[in-house]
Amino acid sequence: MDKPTIAAYDDAANRSAYLDLKSQHKAHPVLDFFISRIPQNGLVLDLGCGVGAEAAIMVQHGLRVDAVDASQGMVDCAQEVHGIAARLATFDDLGSFQNLDGVWAHFSLLHAPRQKLPEYLKDIFNALNPNGVLYISMKCGSGEHRDGLGRFYNYYEVEELERHLQSTGFELVFTNTGTGTGLDEDVMRWVMFLGFKPQPK
């Protein structure tokens, strides 16, 4: 992970306003649907768990959650605010995961270098059990940039990211797009996908 990006999240973890916003137990529009596709007591990787609000909701629904983040500040918040057993890990650790029933990647893989995304998606695909579910959300656009907080971003248009997912082997359940504001308060376009790893033929 990019050091200035991690530093920005470590800094955000110390801001009370950010924690007030991100620590609320409010359901994400797709989270309930994602949870409904995971078997009871299934194992989910929360990739880039932040302060752990979504991991906490998954745990409340009876799932086992491996919550990881590259920011020690975020890991500490997840542990302290929600009691989530979060731990430090980066995208390069994805190859070590296995037997997952789901992967929740909420605005996390957009920090991965463009040339590494196919590798990371393949690692996720290999780590999932058949019928395992992937949720991924990204900011829309093109190229690599840093935002006003110094965070590194890779931007993807909907069709480009869709091709990446399908070429990896995922079957897509739905796509959704919209706009919103992030930590830097800039308005952004975003896309989210939910797909699954099909049963072997």
Image: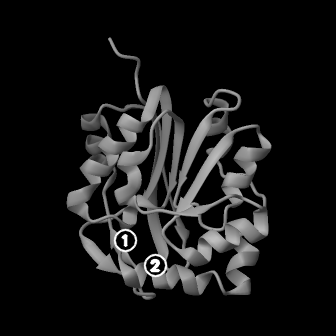
> What crowding class fits label 2: few (fewer than 14 Cα within 10 Å), some (14-19), or many (20 or more)?
many
User: Which residue, given by chain and number where applicable, does mark 1 sit on?
Assistant: 1
Frontmost residue, 93 versus 156: 93
Q: In this view, does 134 lie above or below 144?
A: above
User: Which residue, given by chain and number where applicable, does mark 2 sit on?
Assistant: 6
SS category of the residue bearing label 1: loop
Callout 2–callout 1 Cβ contact below 8 Å: yes
Frontmost residue, 64 versus 29: 64
Q: In which quarter of the image is the N terminus?
A: bottom left
Q: In this view, does 147 lie above or below 180?
A: below
Q: Quadrant of the C terminus?
A: top left
Report the side of 160 relative to 63 (left or right): left
What residue is rendered at 74% in x and 46% in y?
Answer: 59
Find residue 23 and report its image quarter.
bottom right
> What crowding class fits label 1: few (fewer than 14 Cα within 10 Å), some (14-19), or many (20 or more)?
some
Residue type highlighted by circle 2: Ile
